[in-house]
Image (cartoon, rainbow, N blue to C red):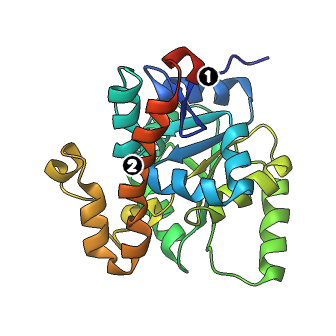
Amino acid sequence: MFKLPKAFSVLGLPVHVMKNYPDWLLDCLKAGQGTHVITLNAEMTIQAERNLVLAKVIQTAELVIPDGAGVVLYLQYLLGQKIQRCPGIELAEKLLETVAQQQIPASIFFYGGAPGVAEKAADLWQKQLPALTISGTHSGYHSPEEEQQLLQTLTQLQPQVIFVGLGVPRQELWIAQNRHLCPHSIWVGVGGSFDIWSGTKTRAPGWLANNNLEWLYRLYQEPWRWRRMLALPEFAFKSLIYRLTAKDVNSLEY
């Protein structure tokens, strides 16, 4: 049995704590160990409180990384863990770069985004890393019949790494439902990463990200998200209550 990393509870959801997430995933890749990677942030944590199916998917995933600043601060200040934020997009980028640099025989598949976005993102990565093998792409907008064709394609190709950019919680639920088709693959929910890789959108400036304000830039780009951003103060309040009512740190370990 492949050894799972140590996990701590953040509002009842596991977050795995380790020094190097990309290296652990590379070990999984080389061993053919099927893995579902969850990139947890405050917004997803609050969604999981109201969506028990999503909560179950997170609880059973092989790797849950601290993607959001709120989750990182919870681990640092409330649980005393020495941990840095690991944005899902950076984890995915590191994985792609290492696979290409080490010439690991692994094929990649991009699924999600508006029509043409995943294809453009794949083309840009292919130009940047010619040694990379991207076996296919598929838009996140399609008919039920087209989705069935996508599932057949994945079954036939058996790509070793599958990036799914459908947004939360759709991508997490879709992976959980379909990962049996490629049981030895690494499945990663990458949110809007395809938009950034394709140049459709840009990431927040470094000074915002370094000060835990990346959410503000995202709100500037997508003002329609303001209702979803209400999860941030809700997460902060519930974190304090949850920690105050916990008996000790050890009781929060998985």
Viewer-nearest of discs 1 and 2 = 2
* Kind of residue at badge 1: Asp
| Image quarter in which the N terminus is found | top right
Whether residue 235 is visible:
yes
| Image quarter in which the C terminus is found | top right
- Tell me: 150 left or right of 24: right
* Percent position of residue 67, x then y: 43, 44
As rendered, which of 18 and 127 lies closer to the eye? 18
Identify the residue at image location x=53%, y=21%: 247
Say which label, 1 or 2, has the lower sequence index: 1
User: Which secondary structure lies at badge 1?
Assistant: helix
As rendered, which of 68 and 149 lies closer to the eye? 68
When the figure is inspected, residue 30 is found, relative to residue 228, above or below; the finding is above
Identify the residue at image location x=37%, y=44%: 70
> Which residue is label 1 attached to?
27
- Could you say which quadrant of the image residue 146 lies in? bottom right
